Image (spheres, rainbow, N blue to C red):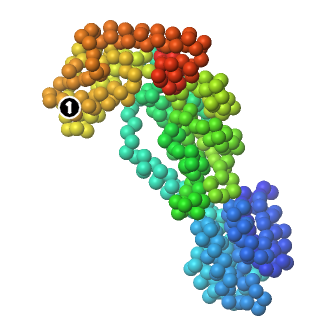
């Protein structure tokens, strides 16, 4: 007979009662602990997340008032508001048991009990425990999602060959449980790809939790991702599940993973390997079931060579890689994207009749869009806000300041060639050392990596 997955704590000052309970319950449940000293209850609760606590009402010889039992009931519920406590009572203490239930006990059980009654009472309590935990998790999840509800995630739009390759890969990988690493420049739609992967998966009816690792400070990393218990630090006024717990059953999207320091990478790797988290301030381990998707615009393979990104973590997160093309690689999609953003912002700013001429579209297609789709989106929004007419023209878009009278595509070619030559010269001078070359060019290492990728160097 298989045991029910549950952790039971029995607290009673009668050793015979404890041994009898343990002998029977360990046949039914996976973990049974007994304790005859109620002062040890906090230590037990600190070490283990018990599903049910069986608590005697009286611990002093000759005491039948039950006040000590009520005291420890309140203490347990203070430590864990979701605790399920079943009071063990003697015959004739019915009024006291009712008082205890009103104080937060789940049920009461008279001594001596029958094993069938004991088992049935615990089974009912376990169902209540699961319901409480699920409600608590859903409330926390809803709170997290509500804080992100104002963020806008536009549709995944495009017909070009590069974006069609992305769609094809998503269709193949989405239904699997494979960890996916989404690569690409800022503004290329990496989060949209992650959400599309989630929608294609068996977890599509579950939650999608997005974590921007670039915006989380090191001292809040563990609290945000793994959660904390009340009192773990100054502002921890209540228990809070982390993003891993909230995403359990669904998809966890870790954006900007390349920004993590090596110590935080080690902590993340441990959780991904064990699929268990411990909230800050608690030693209890909580199992999590997530589909992992990560994203970055940083050159992780180069960072591995330089020792700034763990190779074992990279192997863990990139079962499959998906690269989002830059907008300059899919200029044939610009017309569709422009129409989409015009419709979106025309409605937002009460200008639904806005139009754009083909000459302006042609100009937009010649621009190199270093900020990718996000830059295009902002350019359309700004143009609609400032437009005096219902028709957008080239004059409504100021794509580069202080431009000469040359044609746009010629300027871009000249600037690109000059930049490319400077980069090659800096690399040659420094024998290929990217860090020193970036310093000579007056830009940071990551900015140089992006340019190397852009020019295929």
Q: Give the left or right position of residue 235, taking residue 363 as reference.
A: right
Q: Position of residue 211 (x, y in %)?
A: 51, 42
- The reply to whether residue 200 is in sight is no
Q: Residue furthest left?
A: 389
The answer to whether residue 262 is above or below residue 167 is below
| Quadrant location, the N terminus | bottom right
The answer to whether residue 64 is above or below residue 202 is below
* Residue at x 47%, y 22% (from the top left corner): 442
Q: Position of residue 343 (x, y in %)?
A: 27, 31
Q: Position of residue 328 (x, y in %)?
A: 40, 17
Q: Quadrant of residue 291?
A: top right
Which residue has dot 1 on it?
386
Question: Few, some or many C-alpha atoms within 10 Å of disc 1 (few <14, some 14-19, many ≥20)?
Answer: few
Q: Position of residue 49 (x, y in %)?
A: 68, 61
Q: How many marks?
A: 1
* Residue at x 49%, y 57% (from the top left corner): 139
Q: Quadrant of residue 334?
A: top left
Q: Quadrant of residue 263?
A: top right
SS assignment at label 1:
helix
Which of the two residues, 396 or 430, is positioned nearer the viewer here? 430
- The reply to whether residue 155 is in sight is yes
* Residue at x 69%, y 32% (from the top left corner): 312
* Residue at x 71%, y 61% (from the top left corner): 48
Q: Give the left or right position of residue 99, taking residue 425 as reference.
A: right
Q: Residue furthest bottom?
A: 62
């Amino acid at each position: 007979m298989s045991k029910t997955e549950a952790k039971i704590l029995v607290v009673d000052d009668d050793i015979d009662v404890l041994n009898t309970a343990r002998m029977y319950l360990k046949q039914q449940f996976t973990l049974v602990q007994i304790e005859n000293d109620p002062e040890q209850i906090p230590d037990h609760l600190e070490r283990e997340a018990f599903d049910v606590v069986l608590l005697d009402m009286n611990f002093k010889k000759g005491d039948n008032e039950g006040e000590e039992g009520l005291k420890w009931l309140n203490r347990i519920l203070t430590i864990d508001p979701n605790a399920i406590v079943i009071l063990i009572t003697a015959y004739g203490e019915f009024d006291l048991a009712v008082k205890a239930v009103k104080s937060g006990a789940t049920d009461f059980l008279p001594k001596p009990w029958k094993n069938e009654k004991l088992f049935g009472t615990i089974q009912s309590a376990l169902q209540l425990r699961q319901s409480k935990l699920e409600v608590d998790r859903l409330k926390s999840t809803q709170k997290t999602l509500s804080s992100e509800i104002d963020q806008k995630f536009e549709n995944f739009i495009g017909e070009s060959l590069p974006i069609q390759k992305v769609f094809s890969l998503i269709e193949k990988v989405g239904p699997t449980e494979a960890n996916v690493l989404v690569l690409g420049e800022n503004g290329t739609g990496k989060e949209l790809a992650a959400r599309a992967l989630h929608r294609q998966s068996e977890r599509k009816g579950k939650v999608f939790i997005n974590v921007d690792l670039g915006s989380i400070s090191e001292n809040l990393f563990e609290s945000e991702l793994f959660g904390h218990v009340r009192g773990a630090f100054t502002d921890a006024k209540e228990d809070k599940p982390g993003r891993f717990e909230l995403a359990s059953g669904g998809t966890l999207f870790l954006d900007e993973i390349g920004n993590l320091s090596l110590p935080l990478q080690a902590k993340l790797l441990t959780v991904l390997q064990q699929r268990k988290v411990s909230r800050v301030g608690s030693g209890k381990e909580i199992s999590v079931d997530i589909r992992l998707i990560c994203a970055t615009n940083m050159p992780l393979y180069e960072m591995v060579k330089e020792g700034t990104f763990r190779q074992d973590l990279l192997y863990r997160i990139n079962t499959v890689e998906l690269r989002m093309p830059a907008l300059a690689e899919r200029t044939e999609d610009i017309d569709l994207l422009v129409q989409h953003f015009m419709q979106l912002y025309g409605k937002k700013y009460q200008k639904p009749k806005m139009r754009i001429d083909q000459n302006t579209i042609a100009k937009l297609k010649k621009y190199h869009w270093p900020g990718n789709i996000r830059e295009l989106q902002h350019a359309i929004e700004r143009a609609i806000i400032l437009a005096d007419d219902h028709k957008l023209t080239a004059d409504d878009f100021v794509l580069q300041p202080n431009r000469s009278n040359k044609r746009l595509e010629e300027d871009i070619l000249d600037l690109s060639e000059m930049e490319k030559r400077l980069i090659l010269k800096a690399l040659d001078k420094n024998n290929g050392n990217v860090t020193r070359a970036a310093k000579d060019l007056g830009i940071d290492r990551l900015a140089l990596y992006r340019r190397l990728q852009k020019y295929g160097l």
